[in-house]
């Protein structure tokens, strides 16, 4: 190799002829063809040609050159064509990157349609969601206070039942057309609760029925607002229900929240308390998703058939009653049995601390 550096290009394998050697051999073939062609076209075919190749062909060719030429003739030309060109290599590299980028963006766009919204980080979703308090009609956002009060640390979650998911229970008119949706009743009450608690400077999360923020949700409390079925039981079925998770022990903070809301709701709204249990209450999905230490209840404001007028005529009354129950819990949950509620009680009733287990199914 060292004595013949020009015979091989640096990247060709040992023993393979260099490009220059192949080129010379090709030129010789072309010239030989040209000579024989010229000889055939020439009458007699004996015209003297002054091409240097002829005289060279007459001269004795070294054995080494003849062997090399024969070997070169057997070589396919493909390896030569494959030799990469510096310019096209760079172009290919950029082209590959371009194709990869286009493919990735297309695949990402397609996959986006199949991604469950709950797959997203709750913090990201929270950042994207509209502040629900802004949509409360006719209610001004509370002005910021001069000093940040500890109430801001008391986060409260209010689920507007079925919102963002379905209509919930439906009442139909005589023609079978829906004329009252549970989701509308729930939202009318829930947005008023949120506005009232915001006016008291609490930090409120207005939550959808299936809200990604519910996952491991930590708050001073969580309440879910619903209304009961519009089904006709062929008897008057009326009343409100407040239910905590069956998985939580009786007598704890959940029970106290339930009793605070039930007591204040029953005092303000002309409805009897019902202890009926439905599958929706017992296996309420949000109870299983929130943090185990977040007290939580679900409220059925009333039955949409028998209690329709109360549910639709005065949402402010219902919201005031629920809000009073929430304030009852917030002000008193940390107090022991012997302690009295604060003197500046905000117009709510406080239930007995130790509440007997209600007779469910009554
Ligand atoms: Zn419901």
Image (cartoon, helix red, strand yellow):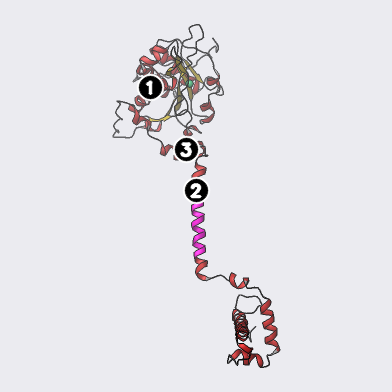
Q: Position of residue 189 (x, y in %)?
A: 39, 21
Q: Quadrant of residue 306?
A: top left
Q: Is residue 315 left or right of residue 280?
A: left
Q: From the viewer's perspective, is the residue at label 1 or at label 3 nearer?
A: 1
The residue sitting at 48% across, 25% down in the picture is 296
The residue sitting at 50% across, 36% down in the picture is 118
**CB atoms at circles 2 and 1 under 8 Å apart?**
no
| First reached walking from the N terminus: tag 2 or tag 1 | 2
- Total of numbered circles in the picture? 3
Question: Which quadrant would the C terminus be assigned to in this image?
Answer: top right
Between 263 and 355, the one lying in front of the other is 263
- What is the number of the mark on residue 122? 3
Q: Is residue 138 left or right of residue 274?
A: left
In the image, residue 65 above or below residue 348: below
Mark 3, other Cα within 10 Å: few <14 / some 14–19 / many ≥20 = some
| Residue 213 in view, yes or no | yes
Question: Which quadrant would the N terminus be assigned to in this image?
Answer: bottom right
Q: Position of residue 119 (x, y in %)?
A: 52, 38
| First reached walking from the N terminus: tag 1 or tag 3 | 3
Residue bearing the label numbered 1 = 188
From which residue to which does the magenta span run?
Answer: 91-104
Q: Position of residue 173 (x, y in %)?
A: 43, 13
Is the residue indicated by label 2 positioned so its CB lies within 8 Å of ligand 1? no
- What is the number of the mark on residue 50? none
Distance from disc 1 to disc 3, alpha carbons, whole Å, reads: 26 Å
Residue bearing the label numbered 2 = 106
Distance from disc 2 to disc 1, alpha carbons, whole Å, reads: 42 Å
42 falls in the magenta region: no
In the image, residue 69 above or below residue 327: below
Q: Is residue 206 left or right of residue 5?
A: left
């Amino acid at each position: 190799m060292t004595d013949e550096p020009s015979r091989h290009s640096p990247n060709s394998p040992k023993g393979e002829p260099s490009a220059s050697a192949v080129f010379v051999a090709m030129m010789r073939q072309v010239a030989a063809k040209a000579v024989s062609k010229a000889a055939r076209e020439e009458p007699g075919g004996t015209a003297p040609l002054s091409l240097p190749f002829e005289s060279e062909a007459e001269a004795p060719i070294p054995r080494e050159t003849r062997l090399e030429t024969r070997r070169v003739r057997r070589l396919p030309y493909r390896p030569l064509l494959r030799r990469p060109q510096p310019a096209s290599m760079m172009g290919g590299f950029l082209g590959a990157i371009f194709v990869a980028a286009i493919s990735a963006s297309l695949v990402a766009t397609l996959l986006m349609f199949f991604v469950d919204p709950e797959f997203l980080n709750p913090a990201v979703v929270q950042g994207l969601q509209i502040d629900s308090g802004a949509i409360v009609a006719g209610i001004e956002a509370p002005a910021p206070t001069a000093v940040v009060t500890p109430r801001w640390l008391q986060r409260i979650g209010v689920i507007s039942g079925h919102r963002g998911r379905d209509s919930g229970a439906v009442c139909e008119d005589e023609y079978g057309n829906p004329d009252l949706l549970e989701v509308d009743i729930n939202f009318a009450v829930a947005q008023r609760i949120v506005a009232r608690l915001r006016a008291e400077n609490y930090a409120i999360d207005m939550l959808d029925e299936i809200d990604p923020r519910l996952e491991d949700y930590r708050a001073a409390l969580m309440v879910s607002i619903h209304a009961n079925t519009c089904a006709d039981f062929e008897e008057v079925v009326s009343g409100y229900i407040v239910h905590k998770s069956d998985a939580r022990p009786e007598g704890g903070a959940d029970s106290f929240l339930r009793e605070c809301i039930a007591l204040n709701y029953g005092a303000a709204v002309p409805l009897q308390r019902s202890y009926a249990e439905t599958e929706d209450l017992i296996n309420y999905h949000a109870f299983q998703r929130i943090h185990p230490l977040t007290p939580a209840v679900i409220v059925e404001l009333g039955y949409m058939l028998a209690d329709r007028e109360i549910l639709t005529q005065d949402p402010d009354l219902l919201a005031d009653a629920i809000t009073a129950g929430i304030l009852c819990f917030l002000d008193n949950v940390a107090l022991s049995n012997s302690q009295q509620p604060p003197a500046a009680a905000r117009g709510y009733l406080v239930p007995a601390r130790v509440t007997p287990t209600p007779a469910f199914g009554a």
